[in-house]
Amino acid sequence: MKDLGAEHLAGREGVQLLGLLNLYLEQEERFQPREKGLSLIEATPENDNTLCPGLRNAKVEDLRSLANFFGSCTETFVLAVNILDRFLALMKVKPKHLSCIGVCSFLLAARIVEEDCNIPSTHDVIRISQCKCTASDIKRMEKIISEKLHYELEATTALNFLHLYHTIILCHTSERKEILSLDKLEAQLKACNCRLVFSKAKPSVLALCLLNLEVETLKSVELLEVLLLVKKHSKINDAEFFYWRELVSKCLAEYSSPECCKPDLKKLVWIVSRRTAQNLHNSYYSVPELPTIPEGGCFDESER
C-alpha cells in the first residue's frame, strides 16, 4: 500500500495538512487524562462519598446541555470534557465538588475557544447550571484547575483529529463533499465523550474509528482506501483500532436507539422572563457551605 504523503495531497495545502497531522500525533499523549486515574474512577462503586463513572458521565451530560444552552461550539464542549477528565484523573475529587469543577471546565474552555462576544458570564453560568457556588468559588477553582494542569488547557483532542482526517479525505477523494457529514460525526463524538471509557482512547484512534464506521455505512471503497492510508501514517495498529472500533460501534448503536436521548437533535431553547431569570436559584448571592479542597489532594504515586 502506498504511503500517505504530501505527494498524494494537493500541493501546498497537502504539505500543511501532513505537517499538522504529525504535530497532532506528537501532542496527543501529552493531553490525555492519566489512564490510572481514570481506571480508579472506573473501579469505584456508586456511593455518596466517592466519584464514580455514573457521576462523571452525568456531569458531562450537564456540560453538553450547558454548551447547547449558551450556543457554544462543539470544540468548547470537547475541550471542557478534556479539562474535566484530566483534572479528575489527577486529583481526588468528592462528588460535592464536581458541579463547581464542571462549570469551571466549561468556562475555561469557552474562554479559549469562543469569540469574546460568545463567552457567557460567570454569573449567568452559575444561575443556569444551578451549581450552588459563588463567583469567588469559581475563580478559586479555576485557579486550582489551571495550576494542576500546568496552565496547558488548550489541548489536542479527538475533534482536532476528526476535522483534520475529514479534510484529508476530501483532498483525496473525487466523491461529493456532502456525502460525509461532519455535523453527524461531531454529534457521534459528543455521544462518546459522555462515556468515561472513551477518555482512555487515543484521540487519533477515536476519531479514526468514528470515520471508519461512517464510511462503512456509505459503502465507499475510495473513502475506505484513504482511511487505511491515514491509519498507516498515524501508526495505529490493528489490535488497538479494532478494540476501540467495537466499543464505538456499540456506543453509537445505543445512541441511535429510541431509548437514547440524542445530542443536537434539537437546539436547546429556554426563554424566561427577566423576573424569572432574576429568581433562578441565585446561589451566588449567598455563600454555600462547601468544604475546601485540600491542595495536596492528588492521587498517590502508587495509585497511578
Image (cartoon, grey):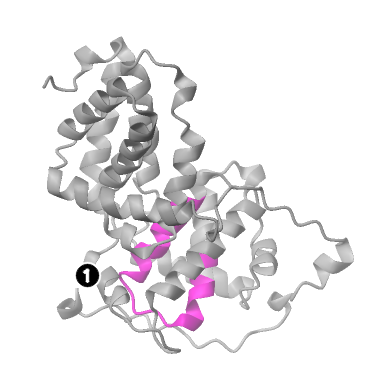
* Residue drawn at the location 63% of the way across and 71% of the way down: 135
* Residue drawn at the location 58% of the way across and 48% of the way down: 264
Q: Is residue 74 above or below residue 247?
A: above
User: Which quadrant of the figure has residue 115?
Assistant: top right
Disc 1 marks which amino acid?
Answer: Lys
Residue in front for this viewpoint, 169 or 292: 169
Q: Name the residue under label 1.
A: 36
* Residue drawn at the location 21% of the way across and 30% of the way down: 228
Q: What stretch is highlighted in magenta?
A: 77-104
Residue in front for this viewpoint, 206 or 294: 206
Q: Can residue 202 be seen in this view?
A: no
Which element type, helix, strand or loop, lies under badge 1? Answer: helix
Q: Where is residue 122 in the image (x, y as percent from the top left)?
A: 64, 62
Q: How crowded is mark 1: few (under 14 residues within 10 Å), some or many (20 or more)?
A: some
Q: Where is residue 113 in the image (x, y as percent from the top left)?
A: 51, 44
Q: In this view, does 75 lie above or below 134?
A: above
Q: Can residue 109 be seen in this view?
A: yes
* Residue drawn at the location 34% of the way across and 50% of the way down: 249
Q: Where is residue 4 in the image (x, y as percent from the top left)?
A: 19, 22
The secondary structure that dominates the magenta segment is helix
Queried whether the magenta region covers residue 87, the answer comes back as: yes
Q: In this view, does 118 lie above or below 98?
A: above
Queried whether the magenta region covers residue 223, the answer comes back as: no
User: Which quadrant of the figure has residue 82?
Assistant: bottom left
The reply, left or right, for residue 223 in relation to residue 81 is left
Q: Where is residue 180 in the image (x, y as percent from the top left)?
A: 44, 28
Q: Is residue 170 above or below residue 207?
A: above
